[in-house]
Image (spheres, grey):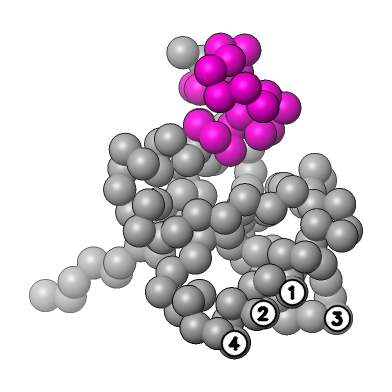
Amino acid sequence: MDAEPKQRVEDLLGDDLQRVTNTKWVREYQPFEERGWRIDLALPTIKLAVEVDGRSHGYAKRHIDDCEKRNALVSAGWKCLTYPASRVLTKKRRLRIVEQITRVLCGVNDVDSDCCTLNGE
C-alpha cells in the first residue's frame, strides 16, 4: 500500500490562508522574470509576499540569496513576511501566523485591535 504524499509546509499555510481570508493566494509566484526567484505564497495585486523558511535557508549561500530576494522585493514595493517552517507545522502557531497575515491584509498594526476578525467570527 502506498503512503499518502506528505503535504509541503508552505501548502499547509497556504490552505489555511485561503480558507480564512477567502482570497486566492498564488503559490510559487515568480516576481521578476529575469530572476529564478519564487515567493512561497503571494498576493501580487497588493504586493504581499509570505515566505516559509526551512532548514536549507540556514546555509550561508541560501541565506545570502534570500536576503537579496527580499531586499529586491521591498525595493519594488512589496511587503514580505517570513516564518520558520517549524512554526508553520504546529497548528496553533500556524493559526497565529494566519491571524498576523490577516491583520496585515486589513492594515491593522495594533495586535490587540479587534477591527479585523477571522472567518467572520
In the picture, residue 41 is in which quadrant? bottom right
Q: Residue 108 lies in magenta, yes or no?
A: yes
Q: Is mark 4 on a helix, strand or loop?
A: helix
Q: In this view, does 54 lie to the left or right of 50?
A: left
Q: Distance between the residues labelled 4 and 2?
A: 6 Å
Magenta: main secondary structure = loop
**Between marks 2 and 1, how big is the CA–CA gap?**
5 Å
The tag earlier along the polypeptide, 3 or 4, is 3
Residue placed under numbered mark 2 in the picture = 65
- Which numbered tag is attached to residue 61? 4
Q: Give the magenta-colored segment's residue range.
A: 99-119
Q: Earlier in the sequence, mark 3 or mark 2?
A: 3
Of badges 3 and 1, nearer the viewer stands 1
Question: Residue 7 shows which numbered tag?
Answer: none
Give the residue number, with chain letter if any, for mark 3.
34
Out of 89 and 64, give the one closest to the viewer: 64
Quickly name the residue at label 1: 68
For numbered disc 3, what is the local secondary structure?
loop
Residue depth check, mark 3 versus mark 2: number of the one nearer the observer? 2
SS at mark 1 in the image: helix
Q: Earlier in the sequence, mark 4 or mark 1?
A: 4
Q: Label 4, label 1: how many angstroms apart (C-alpha)?
A: 11 Å
